[in-house]
Image (tube, rainbow, N blue to C red):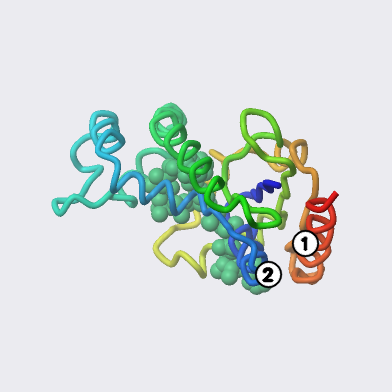
Amino acid sequence: MKIGVTGGIGSGKSIVCKVFACLNIPVYDADTRAKWLTNHDPEIRRAIQELLGPDSYTESGVYNRSYVSSLVFKNPDLLKKLNEIIHPAVGKDTDDWMGKHSDAPYVIKEAAIMNKAGANNNLDFVIVVKAPVDLRLKRIKVRDETRSEDEIRAIIERQVSDEERDSIADFTIDNDENAALIPQVLKLHQLFLEKSTE
Ligand SMILES: CC(C)(COP(=O)(O)OP(=O)(O)OC[C@H]1O[C@@H](n2cnc3c(N)ncnc32)[C@H](O)[C@@H]1O)[C@@H](O)C(=O)NCCC(=O)NCCS
Ligand SMILES: Nc1ncnc2c1ncn2[C@@H]1O[C@H](COP(=O)(O)OP(=O)(O)OP(=O)(O)O)[C@@H](O)[C@H]1O
């Protein structure tokens, strides 16, 4: 069984996935893998440099995330084109990874961008992690000290709306720091274990 975990910037997707990982559930982190691929796949490197220029990689050849970030989060067209370069490779990489974990009761894919389960992906269920925008902003200011409030707001504007995310959710986790997080994850874990033996 394949479960997607998504949510806006600062919602707490990664922290939720860390709890699943503590329960021995394999987790695929699409953001991290996407960055790995930009550094290791020569075809992606060539296409990004063609789209965003030579400065998209540093002199030592490393993907220049702050530069790319400064271009794409204020330009929806460039972001779409960057996604079109990276996402097919991430999709293939996800399938390869999932094939290697077929012995687990279920696996998790964490990603900022996700379709409804079954719509162009192999996911059985999607979990949406939710938190109020103000809290998400506050968390990211603390976590990513170099990102300004304007930059964080620009990312939020480029991401899908809370309503769109709600529409793809099979399950939601409230990470608003009122509802305790770990019991919500444990409840879903039990449910997925039961479903995986049906
Ligand atoms: C734009 C890049 C260079 C910014 O890197 P940086 O380290 O500064 O930021 P980080 O990756 O932490 O992203 C900041 C926030 O934006 C979100 N985000 C990243 N890429 C995207 C995207 N294409 N669309 C919407 N949100 C995104 C992240 O989930 C996070 O919430 C990098 O995120 C990137 O190359 N993104 C394209 C690949 C991608 O789509 N990854 C997401 C899922 S596959
Ligand atoms: N319930 C919580 N209590 C306290 N801190 C939290 C809670 N949830 C998340 N955080 C903190 O908020 C920050 C953002 O959380 P996290 O990195 O999990 O979000 P994310 O959705 O994965 O964000 P991104 O899309 O940027 O990767 C982290 O520093 C995390 O430790």
Q: Which residue is mark 2?
A: 23
Q: Is label 2 in contact with label 1 (beta carbons under 8 Å)?
A: yes
Q: Quadrant of residue 75?
A: top left
Q: Position of residue 91 (x, y in %)?
A: 50, 37
Please indicate whether residue 96 sits to the left or right of residue 43 in the image: right
Please tell me the numbered disc located at residue 94.
none
Q: Which residue is mark 1?
A: 189
Q: Is residue 139 visible?
A: no
Q: Residue at x 58, y 57 (%)?
A: 27
- In the structure shown, which secondary structural element does the residue marked by tag 1 occupy? helix
Please indicate whether residue 185 sits to the left or right of residue 85 in the image: right
Taking depth in this image into account, of 73 and 112 the one nearest to the observer is 112
Residue type, mark 1 in image: His
Taking depth in this image into account, of 10 and 198 the one nearest to the observer is 198
Cα gap from disc 2 to disc 1, whole angstroms: 8 Å
- In the structure shown, which secondary structural element does the residue marked by tag 2 occupy? loop
* Label 2 crowd bin: few (<14), some (14–19), many (20+), radius 10 Å: few
Q: Position of residue 14 (x, y in %)?
A: 58, 61
Please indicate whether residue 176 sits to the left or right of residue 133 in the image: right
Q: Residue at x 42, y 36 (%)?
A: 89
Q: In the image as oriented, which residue stretches furthest toward the left?
A: 59
Mark 1 CB within 8 Å of ligand 2: no
Q: Is residue 139 above or below residue 73?
A: below
Q: Residue at x 27, y 33 (%)?
A: 43
Q: In the image as oriented, which residue stretches furthest toward the front?
A: 103
Q: Residue at x 43, y 50 (%)?
A: 33
Q: Position of residue 13 (x, y in %)?
A: 62, 57
Residue type, mark 2 in image: Leu
